[in-house]
Amino acid sequence: MVGTPLVEVDGRRLRLTNLDKVLYPETGTTKGDVIHYYATIAPALLPHLTERPVTRKRWPDGVGSAAAPIEAFFEKDLGMGVPDWVLRQTILHSGGEKRYPVVTDRATLVWLAQTAALELHVPQWRFDTDRRPTRMVLDFDPGQGTGLAECAQVALWAKAILDDMGLATFPVTSGNKGIHVYVPLDGRLSSDQVSDVAHELARALEADHPAEVISTMPKERRVGKVFIDWSQNNAKKTTISPYSLRGTARPFAAAPRSWNEIAAPGLTQLDFSEVLERFDAMGDLLAALDPSPAVRPPELLRGQIDLALAKAAERVPEAAALPGGSGYEPKLDGWRAAAVVDVDRVTLWSRQKTNLTESFPDVAAAIAEQIEAGVVLDGELVRWRDGRLDFDALQRRFASGKQRRRRLVDEEPIDFVVFDILAAGGRDLRGLPYDERRRALEQLAVDWRPPLSLIDTTADTAEGRRWFEELPDRGIEGVVVKGGGQPYRGGQRDW
């Protein structure tokens, strides 16, 4: 392992090996290319994996060629040698318990790519919906003598029926031979009920188009027809995830498409580079597919949080002193706090990991009213009095009993000044550069009202030095300097 790069992905450290190993010989696509794909497509892919057990198909020696394909290792159980930060869930099978990875972050995706897990398969249900499906899938598979064009025609016939039922539909070219069509569900139906609906729809299409469609399993009956596989809605079965690579001779991927594309002549499967280009230009065409029951903060950010720290300096550094250029912020004399916005509560944690929520109910209530679930913020609780910061007011509030505290909420209101964002929309943002986190924070703060506010910042070194000299007169301790290219590292003195 000597000489192999140890990288940090969103705050997680992992070792990458054999990056030049060719996994797709026909195109020369390497493991490094695969890792780059999964790291880049993560924002689109992760919502379709979250809270689902992931079954992997690995090709550590590559996929081979069209003439001589190499068999994959099909893996459900995680096995040994798994980083302790990979989330997992246990499922009881007839042969015993198996531990599955639950992929919620980019670091886990990169780790899977490092193991040459090219294909990621998931069921239609999620753990957080009591294993009830959040989507229905129809798999249009071409029989001998048919191809993608015939699959597209049958998918369009299915769309017409689903449209009449008032259901939304999302097509995906599978990256192999056919087309998947997804229908979002509200999680009230069981897998058996969804399977029955899908089966009945497939039978109806077969009855309407007997020369073109078949809904039964025997392969010898599929010649010249498109097989509608409805069985993947069974709770025990899985489907290739949208955006997953395929273990085909060329690096195709399961690619979200528009219905206009499905209806147009010349439809083809897309390779991973085309999928990345489309995502960059069009975003996630499946963003509305999985209506999560609730967006929650990442698991590691729901409890006590290690906050980033600053080290003391006697002078303000130059703009180029930190990676990505320096940004300057006032260092407020208050109480540092992380605000965790969950589905049913807001929790305020101190830097010492004390729960401050009961002491500052006014701040918690304002956050709950103005900020959606799935967000984690880093900021400072402060009390302004006559244009200066009043640190003693925070101590009075914290030391007060319930009755006095209610009075102090009115007499000495507390503000929460936010200077960083650790999660948004249920996604961990700590691995992003500070400049990107700041942009996300500014978008979030557009409509904030007191007691919430956003810390001032400047990239102007002269302005930062002026703050450093003048602001202490207002009870402000000095200036915090952050690198625009730095991730958020809890417990480390990077600022």
Image (tube, rainbow, N blue to C red):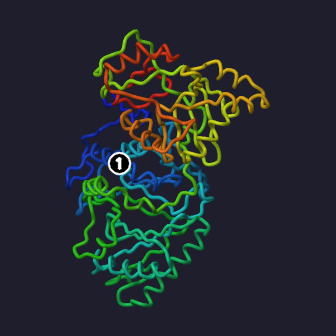
Q: Give 422 or 227, whichever is nearer the viewer.
A: 422
Compared with residue 417, is residue 26 higher up or lower down, i.e. above or below? below
Residue at 49% from the left image edge and 28% from the top image edge: 490
- Residue 44 in picture, x, y percent from top left: 39, 53
For disc 1, the marked residue is 38
- Residue 114 in picture, x, y percent from top left: 36, 42
Q: Is residue 88 visible?
A: no
Which residue sits furthest top?
314
Which residue sits furthest left?
27
- Residue 20 in picture, x, y percent from top left: 24, 41
Determine the secondary structure under disc 1.
helix
Q: Residues within 10 Å of mark 1 (few under 14, many from 20)?
A: many
Residue at 23% from the left image edge and 76% from the top image edge: 265
Compared with residue 342, is residue 397 higher up or lower down, i.e. above or below? above
Left or right, 11 with reference to 225: right
Residue kind at label 1, given as amino acid type: Tyr
